[in-house]
Amino acid sequence: MKKRILLVDDEAPITRMMRRNLESTGRFEVLDVNDPTQALPLARQFKPDLALFDVMMPEKDGGELAADFKDDPALSRVPVVFLTAIVSRNEVNPTGSLIGEHTFLAKPVKLEELLACIDAQLGGQ
């Protein structure tokens, strides 16, 4: 059964590329959202196994979105991974580093690193 990944980033070319790359593995169903204010209601319908959030977005940043997920009974157990261009790739561990309690990866993210991080977050499910 394919794992469901919610991808939230305000840059549509990034979400399209990442969705295609993840879906090409045959392991994932990906919902990409470019308006972070729509992420919560769409996530409730989609029921993701994992969420990938850009950190810096207009109107609602990744941290606010992660807090919304934590406060929502239907989404509070969904692992959240931040994607950020704020740090460089050499500042991040291959499977991700931490911002607070959340793992983060530096953009641009290589597919192998993203898959390793997803597998670590989902416990190889």
Image: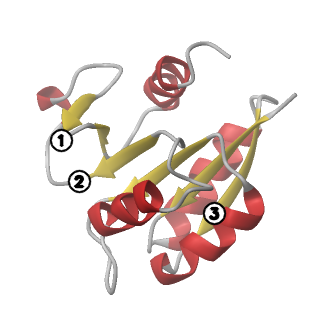
Q: Residue at x 34, y 79 (%)?
A: 60
- Residue 88 on image: x %, y %: 15, 40
Could you classify mark 2 by the number of other residues whose Cα lies within 10 Å: few (under 14), some (14-19), or many (20 or more)?
some
Where is residue 30 drawn, in percent x and y? Answer: 71, 50
Residue kind at label 3, given as amino acid type: Asp
Separation (CA) of disc 2 from disc 1: 17 Å
Q: Quadrant of residue 38?
A: bottom right
Q: Are marks 2 and 3 in contact (CB under 8 Å)?
A: no
Q: Total number of numbered labels?
A: 3
Q: Viewer-proximal residue, 85 or 99?
A: 99
Q: Residue furthest front?
A: 73
Q: Which residue is mark 2?
A: 85
Kind of residue sitting beneath label 2: Ala
The residues tagged by marks 3 and 1 sit, at their Cα atoms, a distance apart of 24 Å
Is 40 drawn above or below residue 100 in the view shown? below
Q: Residues within 10 Å of mark 1 (few under 14, many from 20)?
A: few
Q: Residue placed at 67% from the left, 48% from the top?
A: 48
Q: Which residue corresponds to mark 1? A: 100
Q: Nearer the viewer, mark 2 or mark 3?
A: 3
Q: Is residue 24 above or below residue 18?
A: above
- C-alpha span from label 2 to label 3: 18 Å
- Residue 62: x %, y % from top left: 33, 63
Secondary structure beneath label 3: strand
Mark 3 and 1 residues: CB-CB less than 8 Å, in contact? no
Residue behind mark 3: 32
Left or right for 93, reference 76: left
Contact check, label 2 and label 1, Cβ < 8 Å: no
| Other residues around mark 3 within 10 Å, as few (<14) / some (14–19) / many (≥20) | many
Residue 120, placed above or below residue 10:
above
Q: Which sits earlier in the primary sequence, circle 2 or circle 3?
A: 3
> Label 1 is placed on what type of residue?
Gly
